[in-house]
């Protein structure tokens, strides 16, 4: 393994036509000798957080905040029936993984209930599924020029509209992804 890409964004190159990753931005949550795991953060699906919360099998006597019309994202093609919440809170829920001091990933439904109550983290991305790579697979895809890598920036994930995250992340490198050729040059 070369560089550890935990807490980096993978920006899909225009030539990447896999429907799961075409024009995607994926936040790498963990990268080590066993592979990598990430959440795609710019592919909303036809489901909002409020609807997802309503499917939870819990008694909820309280009125959910109607401001939770935020979209749920297709986080990747692995375990698409499992929920993941990227967030910036210092709080920990039943199943919270610390990516870094300012970024966490929670998989337990208690965070969704807190989001519904209006007591959850200020900034969240709720996703179904994740992206996974086996040992050396991501490194090979990088060598094949399938991805650009960009250091994490909270404003791209939490404050930029989903449809602008791909270009916004690439622009951090001074690149307009719309102008990149799909052909490799040979000198």
Image (cartoon, helix red, strand yellow):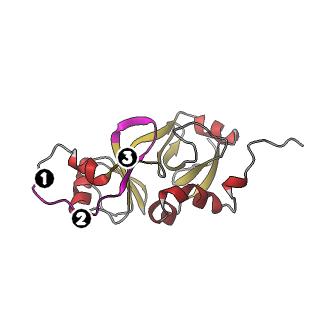
Residue 168 horizontal/vertical position (percent): 58, 61
Disc 1 marks which residue?
Answer: 60
Vertical comparison of 150 with 159: above or below: above
Whether residues under marks 3 and 2 lie with C-beta atoms below 8 angstroms apart, the answer is no
SS state under label 3 = strand
Residue drawn at x 62%, y 52% as measured from the top left: 149
The label number, if any, that marks residue 119 in the structure image: 2
Residue 138, quarter of the rendered image: top right
Count numbered badges in the picture. Answer: 3
Q: Is residue 152 left or right of residue 104?
A: right
Disc 3 marks which residue?
Answer: 46
The segment highlighted magenta reads: 61-82
SS state under label 1 = loop
Q: Is residue 94 visible?
A: no
Residue drawn at x 32%, y 46% as measured from the top left: 107
Between residue 8 and residue 45, name the one nearer to us. Answer: 45
């Amino acid at each position: 393994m070369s560089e550890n890409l935990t807490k980096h964004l993978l920006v899909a190159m225009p030539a990447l036509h896999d429907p799961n990753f075409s024009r995607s931005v994926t936040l790498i949550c963990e990268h080590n000798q066993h592979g990598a795991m990430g959440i795609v953060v710019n592919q909303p699906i036809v489901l909002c957080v409020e609807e997802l919360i309503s499917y939870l099998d819990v008694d909820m006597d309280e009125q959910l905040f109607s401001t939770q019309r935020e979209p749920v994202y297709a986080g990747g093609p692995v375990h698409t029936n499992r929920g993941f919440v990227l967030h910036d809170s210092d709080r920990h829920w039943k199943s919270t993984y610390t990516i870094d001091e300012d970024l966490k990933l929670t998989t337990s439904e208690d965070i969704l209930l807190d989001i519904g109550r209006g007591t959850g983290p200020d900034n969240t991305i709720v996703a179904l599924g994740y992206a996974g790579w086996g040992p050396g697979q991501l490194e090979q895809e990088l060598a094949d020029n399938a991805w650009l890598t960009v250091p994490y920036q909270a404003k791209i994930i939490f404050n930029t509209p989903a449809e602008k995250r791909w270009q916004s992340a690439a622009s951090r490198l001074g690149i307009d992804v719309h102008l990149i050729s799909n052909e490799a040059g040979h000198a």
